[in-house]
Amino acid sequence: MFSDDKLDMSNAEGLKRKLKTFFLPHTKFQFINDHYGLRPGKMHVLLAAAGKGKSTLARSILLDIAEKEPVLFYVTEESKEDLETQFAYNEISQRQVDNIFLVQESKDVGYELRNSVEKWLGYLRIKVKNSGAKVIFLDNITSSAVYNSVDAQREMILGLKELIEELDVAIFIICHAKKGIKNNEWFKEDDVKGSTQISITAHFFYAYNMFVVPGRGEGDAKHAFIRILKSRGYPNIAFSYDLQFNFNTYSYEGDKRVKTSDLERVAKASSKLL
């Protein structure tokens, strides 16, 4: 018999098995699979500089999930027409089309919702329930009209954490790095634009960096990779992930696990980070 103030370790083996159980199908991305997927009730955050390809990566992950499960795609910057053009290049399937439920903040979220985090969270709750989405993709939280003050940012992040736990869904959030980060600097958790509540609350926090490798007669090559800055409960921080880009479909088709120490040496030898 255990009371509320005592730990109950009678099912330790079962808890370990649960920790290593995939709740969604495997993705094409090892940096997600190494954490056993986009787990329900968990917040994944991707940090990157503006205009460097983070949305392209997010769409690649979204399409991978949408081949198997419904997803809610909340966008703050791009229009429906922009997305349709991009998805056309991505060679989107009808099954993926059917599984993507789009929310355009500029069109679907009015003044009243933008100025009340509580009402905005209520709106999002209805959208998730009606769509049956297993994952929410939010691109980009730092450019959201709701994310308009430090207090609103804190309320929004903590509210999203409660929401995904209540609905038992995962969330993948894209955010900008703050201004003033130099090209030769590696991102840290507190480099996020706005409140650092998002890096405190996130279960998994990824940094997307790009660096230039000088070419030999063929021009310089841009190289994108993921570093894991935070991995709550999973000891995979020693690894980074080399992203594989497909120029035909204009999307990322996967990644390769590399040692972070090896990647740092390559990046140091390159001309600059982007």
Image (tube, rainbow, N blue to C red):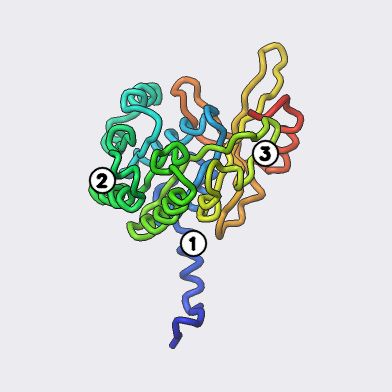
Q: Residue at x 58, y 41 (%)?
A: 207
- Position of the N terminus, as image quadrant, is bottom left
Q: Residues within 10 Å of mark 2 (few under 14, many from 20)?
A: some
Cα distance between the residues tagged 3 and 2:
38 Å
Q: Residue at x 55, y 50 (%)?
A: 196
Which residue is denoted by mark 3 in the rendering?
Answer: 186
Rendered image: mark on residue 19: 1
Rendered image: mark on residue 103: none
Looking at the image, residue 42 sits to the left or right of residue 121; the answer is right
Type of residue at label 3? Trp
Type of residue at label 1? Leu
- Cβ atoms at labels 3 and 1 below 8 Å apart: no
Q: Earlier in the sequence, mark 2 or mark 1?
A: 1
Q: Residue at x 40, y 55 (%)?
A: 159
Residue 52: where, in percent of width, then height?
A: 55, 28
Looking at the image, residue 91 sits to the left or right of residue 228; the answer is left
- Position of the C terminus, as image quadrant, is top right
Type of residue at label 2? Ser
Cα distance between the residues tagged 2 and 1:
27 Å
Q: Circle 1 — which element?
A: helix
Q: Earlier in the sequence, mark 3 or mark 1?
A: 1
Which residue is denoted by mark 2 in the rendering?
Answer: 131
- Cβ atoms at labels 2 and 1 below 8 Å apart: no
Residue 189: where, in percent of width, then height?
A: 60, 47
Q: Circle 3 — which element?
A: loop
Q: Circle 2 — which element?
A: helix
Q: Residues within 10 Å of mark 3 (few under 14, many from 20)?
A: some
- Residue farthest to the bottom? 1
User: In the figure, residue 115 lies in which quadrant?
Assistant: top left
